[in-house]
Amino acid sequence: MSSPRDACREESTGLGILKDDLVSHTYEQLTNFEVSAEVDLKIKCFESEKFGKHLLTHAKEKSHICEICSKVFTQRSSLISHLLTHTKEKPFVCEICTKAFARIGNLKSHLHTHKKEKPYVCKICSKGFTRNGHLNSHMLIHRNGKPYVCEICTKAFDRNDTFKSHLLTHTKEKPHVCQICSKGFTQNSSLKSHLLTHTKEKPYVCIICNKGFMQNGSLKSHMLIHTNEKPYVCEMCCKAFRHSNSLKSHFLIHTKEKPYVCETCNKVFTDNSSLKSHLFTHTNEKPYVCEICTKAFARNKKPMGL
């Protein structure tokens, strides 16, 4: 009984004949979308990596050109894999979930998702990945000097203490408690800023208009009003903003995301401030009071023209 390799050799004695023969079948597949057993046999035969490289020793011209789109390949096996993109064939099928792939390498990478294997490991932080491409993307974090990566949201940090504080936002822990009102915070710096609301201190003063602020970050944001700077620019529509949070909220308009959900009625919002204002409709609170007539409102929305 002859082997599949012998069957291919008997039918196509030269590389040129083989190329013409295979392409003719490819055209048939493009019109009928049916793969004959004969072509399938040739594909299996020539996808052998060792045999594909061996064929190059017989070829006078060590370049393989797709006659459909003229793309050039250095290896016969690469050309054969490429031809499947024209026929839309996906001969490599996952036995677990039946998902199909055009290339065996893609199938092998996919199988790691079922086995939970992560063979590509970062040498810096030991985090594992199912694909080499994911590892390469991860390495950019270390190049930017942020080796501490949150596994929940993938946010990266340059310091371990900042990273640990960030983790508390996911666990909902608030170990730093105000002794005056018992309000809890995930970070000690947030508690210190909060304490100023009780003392009414505003140690950060604008040198232009003498307005005081409780936090240095608030002062820096305020200074942009005087300089008219808007350093945060949307990459999709080029709209500029003074604050990074404003840019983040704006970006959700493009992505259509509404990550802030009301736990009472499940209504969703693009930003946290809109959610907070909405919550007052459930509690009937009206914290915003007009200084002229003392009328109270649930939202801090200024009238037109002010």
Image: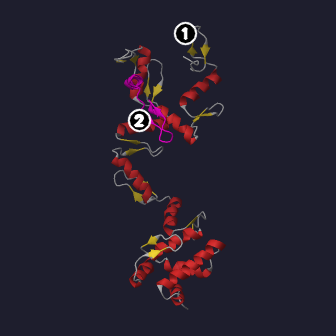
Residue 51 in view, yes or no? yes
Magenta-drawn segment: 215-244
Q: x and y percent of residue 204 in the render? A: 36, 19
> Residue at the spot x=56%, y=37% of the render?
253
**Where in the figure is residue 121, as x and y percent of width and height?**
39, 57
Q: Which residue appears at 41% of the width and 14% of the height?
A: 199
Q: Quadrant of residue 21?
A: bottom right
Residue 92 seen anywhere in this rendered image of the structure = no
Viewer-proximal residue, 173 or 51? 51
> In x, y percent, where is residue 206?
36, 18
Please identify the quarter of the rendering in which residue 40 is found.
bottom right
Q: Give me the disc on residue 291.
A: 1
Relative vertical location of residue 6 with respect to residue 227 in this rendering, above or below: below
| Quadrant location, the N terminus | bottom right
Tag in front: 1 or 2: 1
The C terminus lies in which quarter of the figure? top right
- Secondary structure under the numbered disc 2 in the rendered image: helix
Q: Amino acid at mark 1?
A: Glu
As drawn, 53 above or below 181: below
Q: Which residue is mark 2?
A: 165
